Image (tube, helix red, strand yellow):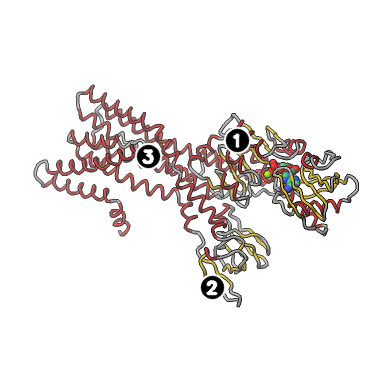
Amino acid sequence: MASVVGFLREYRVVTATLLVGLLGGILELAGPPDAARWTISVFALVVAALQARGMIADLRAGSYGIDLLAVTAIVSTVLVGEYWAALVVCLMLSGGEALEDYAAGRARRELSALLERAPQIGHRFLPDGTVVDVPVTELVVGEEVLVKPHELVPVDGVLLSEDATFDESSLTGESLPVDRRRGDDLLSGSVNGGEAVRVRVTAAAADSQYQRIVELVREAQDSKAPFVRLADRVAVPFTVVAFLIAGLAWFLSGEATRFAEVLVVATPCPLIIAAPVAFMAGMSRSARNGVIVKGGGTLEQLSRVRTVAFDKTGTLTYGTPHVARVDVADGLGPDEILSLAAAVEQYSSHPLAAAIVAAARERRLTVPAATDVEEVTAHGVRARVDGRAVVVGKASFVADEVSGVRDVPLEPGQTGVHVGVAGRYAGVVALADEIRAETSETLAGLHRAGVRTTMMLTGDAEPTARHIAAGIGIDDVRAGLLPEHKVDAVRAVTARPVMMVGDGVNDAPVLAVADVGVAMGAKGSTAASESADVVIMLDDLYRTVRAVQIGRRTMRVAWQAIGIGLGFSLVLMLVAAAGLLPAIVGAWMQEVVDLTCILWALLASRPGREERAEQNRVEALRAERVRTAGAPVGRTELARQ
Ligand code: ADP
Ligand code: MG
């Protein structure tokens, strides 16, 4: 009951319309002749006038008012004496707004939940070991906080307790709880398991994972472009056709009533409401799957993607290479080369750098400090170590500084990091990076979802790139590219839209020029997720397929909803033009049509047949992979829809 009162208070025009309807009914039965007609007509005209005012404001703001039909419908029904029909149109107009709010609310359920669940407080440890509650915004990097059982991790941090389990599903879409050990990174917004843990803060609230997602989601919700465009494309022709039919019906029959009867069933509510609802539902569903889409326009592009380009390291591969061996030239031994390379690489954030440092540590080599460190993006790093000039990177880069670089063939698929010391070539560190378990099924899935061409864009050497591409079935391989060459390559693609998937290291420019830039793993650099249109929260390449599928499903549902609404409307118009549909019946029929197409649009909240088939296929593949030889299981996880 309370909710009914709340509803009536919030939607005043609906309430007024219902009251006028009640009053009209009483007057019709017991009032003086024509009292009902006058009351209802005046009210309907006022509603029409209000609507027209809004329409003019819209026109001024540059968007087409497609309410012209509704306004004309009200005025013409009043003029021909079909005032009850006019009242039903008023109800539809005002009720439509309520319906829209309801549908939009349902459609963005997950997005809203994400925003509302943001962590608010943290439990700070005081020096004496006691704990006080402070707002998350006051937590500073380096301090320790307590996270109680089943609580949200307030900001990003590292685990200080021995081990614990966290539910990261709202962040990544990964439904299984993940185990974390002492020293592991924790994401704000993940939910602690059953034990209280200590956490050291590594990022302030504003820089933390959850708060960044919230930012992305806000951006997504605010973007309205495609809804308007989609509707605009159809609105004007539809309006013209409606007026033509109505005018022709009037002309041929000689009855003005026909004009009103046609327009009553011509209100294009599907255009205004159904498409936005479908888009909102699509964005919400992708968020639930760990894919943050930064706007409805991106969903539209995703649905049509023709070409997909991938970065290699960290995208097609895990991006956690390991040192396979060290080839020495002459002079220095392998350990010395590794130790010097690590000394330089410890200042770089490149995945290859991390691997070299890790290898040196593993072999318990000393890693001296370096000075004058200079990293040249996509080439390598130069620095001074113990008075010697050390240069580390790709063959051509090292060859600029030292002579005698030998670009010896490595094992297929391995990447060579060359090392020059004090003007002489020292040798090469061979690194192997594993191809992701889900890479092949991702490429196949993309093709099934309508993608024509797949490309690999990499800064790595040609033989390495070719070997990896051959194993996974990539069509087009471009190797030895600098970031600006990657940009050129994406710009030159003719089969568009083109999607670029990168892991975030050095990828920001190329993500920005692609029609759809996809950044893998929110843990990647901030720069990349800012220039990306889609951020995949989980380190799972297969989510790119999910993103395309959700885009396709959303567009299909949006067009279906519009088609159903306008199709029915058109049929009703023709029936009305033939004089077979009294205005009052038509007005109610149109209500039914509106409701149907809005409910249809909400179907974008659920996967379609194509998606379910793909899901079954991939699940079978994974089961197969587990059965045979216990091959590593990809993190592709499709249970959540
Ligand atoms: P990718 O396209 O595979 O992501 P990048 O553009 O990041 O590759 O780098 C291209 C190449 O440049 C690498 O394969 C490597 O040979 C070299 N390189 C870049 N940065 C470094 C570094 N810090 N240490 C060693 N080599 C590097
Ligand atoms: Mg890279």
Q: Amino acid under label 1?
A: Arg
Earlier residue among tags 3 and 2: 2
Residue at the extreme top of the image, as rendered: 252
Indicate yes or no: mark 2 CB to ligand 2 under 8 Å: no
* Residue plotted at (59% across, 72% down): 125
Q: Marks 3 and 1: which is nearer the front?
A: 3
Residue at the extreme right of the image, as rendered: 331
Q: Position of residue 363 (x, y in %)?
A: 83, 57
**Secondary structure at numbered mark 3:** helix
**Ligand 1 lies in quarter:** top right
Check if mark 3's residue and mark 1's residue have beta carbons within 8 Å: no
Work out whether residue 233 or residue 483 is closer to the camera in this orientation and state it. Answer: 483
Residue at the extreme left of the image, as rendered: 32
Q: Which mark is residue 132?
A: 2
Q: Amino acid under label 3?
A: Ile
Residue 631 showing in the rendered view: no
Q: Position of residue 588 (x, y in %)?
A: 28, 39
Q: Position of residue 484 (x, y in %)?
A: 65, 37
* Residues packed near mark 2 inside 10 Å, few (<14), some (14 to 19) or many (20 plus): few
Q: CA distance from mark 3 to mark 1?
A: 32 Å
* Residues packed near mark 3 inside 10 Å, few (<14), some (14 to 19) or many (20 plus): many
Give the residue pinned by disc 3.
Answer: 272
Give the residue pinned by disc 1.
Answer: 448
Quarter of the image containing the N terminus? bottom left
Q: Position of residue 520 (x, y in %)?
A: 62, 47
